[in-house]
Image: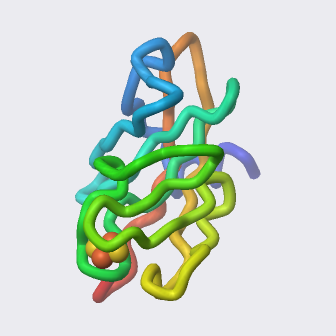
């Protein structure tokens, strides 16, 4: 069962764990999808990187206390859950499965939805 799930959604190697900064997010791209990597404590979180409001990259925003603030108009999102914290953000962010293997950060990214 696990093998089939992995075949449908393979893991993508995106970064070295020791290159992630707890104060600054890292933007990566997998299968055409922009994804932000955030290091909270010892845990890496992967969240949709394009702000739903007007397409700014959240990985270029301001990270503090587990929250990312959009650099353009200050939409705020909880990094661990993707939850939108103020009205301008419009909706919650998609979160992606993360694993760390031998010091490498890997993501499972389902195909983008049509029109997304
Ligand atoms: S583009 Fe992010 S709040 Fe406007």
Q: Nearer the viewer, residue 1 or 44?
A: 44
Residue found 50% across the figure and 42% down from its top: 107
Horizontally, is 77 left or right of 24 in the view?
right
Q: Nearer the viewer, residue 21 or 46?
A: 21
Horizontally, is 41 left or right of 24 in the view?
right
The spot of residue 98 in percent (x, y) is 59, 41
In the rendered view of the protein, which quadrant contains the C terminus? bottom left
The vertical placement of 55 against 42, above or below, is below
The spot of residue 51 in percent (x, y) is 35, 70
The vertical placement of 22 against 46, above or below, is above
Residue found 56% across the figure and 33% down from its top: 39
Residue found 51% across the figure and 67% down from its top: 76
Tally of numbered tags: 0
Residue at the right extreme of this rendering: 1
Horizontally, is 101 left or right of 30 in the view?
right
- Quadrant location, ligand no. 1: bottom left
The spot of residue 17 in percent (x, y) is 50, 19
Horizontally, is 83 left or right of 34 in the view?
right
Residue found 30% across the figure and 56% down from its top: 34
The vertical placement of 43 against 60, above or below, is above
What's the colour scheme? rainbow
**Quadrant of the rendered image containing residue 27:** top left
The spot of residue 52 in percent (x, y) is 37, 78
């Amino acid at each position: 069962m696990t093998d089939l799930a992995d075949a449908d959604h393979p893991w993508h190697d995106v970064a070295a764990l020791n290159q992630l900064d707890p104060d600054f997010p890292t933007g990566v791209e997998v299968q055409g999808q922009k994804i932000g990597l955030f290091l909270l404590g010892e845990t890496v979180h992967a969240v949709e990187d394009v702000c739903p409001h007007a397409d700014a990259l959240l990985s270029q925003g301001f990270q503090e206390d587990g929250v990312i603030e959009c650099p353009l108009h200050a939409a705020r999102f909880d990094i661990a859950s993707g939850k939108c914290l103020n009205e301008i953000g419009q909706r919650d962010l998609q979160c992606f499965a993360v694993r760390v293997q031998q010091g490498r950060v890997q993501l499972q990214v389902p195909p983008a939805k049509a029109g997304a």
